[in-house]
Image (cartoon, rainbow, N blue to C red):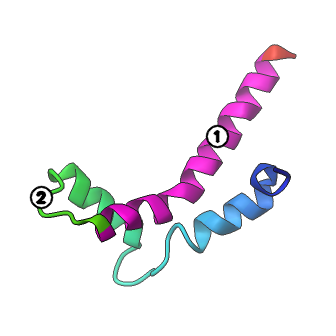
């Protein structure tokens, strides 16, 4: 559990796995555009890509929420 709570590791994951491949645009950006466009003709592999490349950002969002909640609780 220490790994998913480490800011440095999560940010590195976001910048590498989350955004790879970088050119011509980050993969997750293309998939999000596809989803916002109605996800027409998305196959299982495309959904797996969304989960794979989006998971680091979910971890980052989780850490941000935990930080805000713990700050408000104190």
Of discs 2 and 1, which sits in the foreground? 2
Q: Which residue is mark 2?
A: 40
Q: Is residue 29 left or right of residue 4?
A: left
Q: Is residue 42 left or right of residue 25?
A: left
**Is residue 38 depicted above or below 45 in this figure?**
above
Q: Is residue 27 left or right of residue 18?
A: left
**Is residue 24 depicted above or below 1 in this figure?**
below
**How far across and how far down the image is residue 39, in percent?**
18, 55
User: Residue most toward the front?
Assistant: 44
The mark that comes first in sequence, 2 or 1, is 2
Name the residue: 12% across, 58% down: 40
**How far across and how far down the image is residue 11, in percent?**
68, 61
**How far across and how far down the image is residue 57, in percent?**
55, 53
**Is residue 63 depicted above or below 9 in this figure?**
above
Q: Main secondary structure of the magenta part?
A: helix
Name the residue: 56% across, 72% down: 17
Name the residue: 39% across, 72% down: 27
Q: Is residue 14 left or right of residue 21?
A: right
Q: Residues within 10 Å of mark 2 (few under 14, many from 20)?
A: few
Q: Which residue is mark 1?
A: 62
Q: Toward the viewer: 30 or 47? A: 47
Mark count: 2
Q: Toward the viewer: 12 or 47? A: 47
Q: Is residue 47 magenta?
A: yes
Cα distance in 3D space between marks 2 and 1 = 29 Å
Q: Is residue 71 magenta?
A: yes
Disc 1, SS: helix
Point out the stretch of residues depicted in magenta.
45-72
């Amino acid at each position: 559990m220490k790994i998913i709570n480490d800011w440095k590791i999560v940010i590195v994951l976001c910048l590498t796995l989350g955004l790879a491949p970088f050119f011509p645009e980050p993969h997750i950006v293309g998939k999000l555009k596809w989803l916002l466009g109605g996800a027409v003709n998305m196959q299982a592999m495309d959904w797996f890509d969304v989960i794979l490349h989006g998971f680091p950002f979910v971890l980052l969002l989780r850490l941000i929420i935990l930080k805000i909640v713990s700050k408000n609780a104190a």
